[in-house]
Amino acid sequence: MLCALVGWGCWLELLVGAIGIAENRADLSNIGPTAAITFLTVFYGYFFKIFAIALALVLDAE
C-alpha cells in the first residue's frame, strides 16, 4: 500500500510542477529551475518507492 502511494505522489508533484512551468512561460529564466524541481520530485518519489519495496522484502523475510 505504501509503495503505491509513493508512486502516485511523485506523478502528482510532476503535474504541480508542470503548472508552475506554465505559469512562468513569460519569463524564460525561471523555467529551468522550475523544471529541475519538477523532475527532482519524480526522482525522489521513485527512490523512496524502491526503498519501501526493499524494506518490505526485508521485513517479510524475517
Image: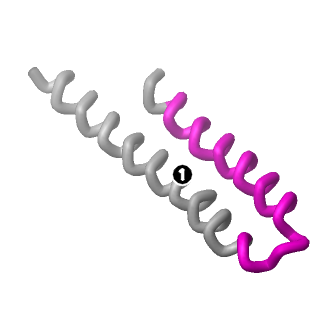
> Considering depth in this image, is 51 or 35 the residue closer to the camera?
35
Left or right for 36, reference 28: left
At x 18%, y 23%, the residue is: 59
- The residue positioned 41% from the left and 41% from the top of the image is 49
Q: Quadrant of residue 54?
A: top left
Residue depicted at 52% across the width and 31% down the height: 4
Label 1: element kind: helix
Q: Is residue 24 magenta?
A: yes
- Residue 42 in percent (x, y) is at 54, 53
- Percent position of residue 23, x then y: 86, 58
| 2 left or right, relative to 42 | left
Task: Report the residue marked by disc 1.
Answer: 41
Determine the main secondary structure of the stretch shown in magenta: helix
The magenta region covers: 4-30
- Image quarter for residue 56? top left
Q: Is residue 57 above or below residue 29?
A: above
Residue 31 rendering spot, x and y as whole percentages? 73, 71
> What amino acid is labelled 1 in the image?
Thr
- Quadrant in which the C terminus is drawn: top left
Residue found at x 77% / y 55%: 20
Image position of 19 with respect to 5: above or below: below
**Near-viewer residue (48 or 40):** 40
Question: Can you give x and y, in whole percent of width and height, for residue 14 in the image?
Answer: 67, 51
The picture quadrant where one finds residue 33 is bottom right
Is residue 18 on the magenta stretch? Answer: yes
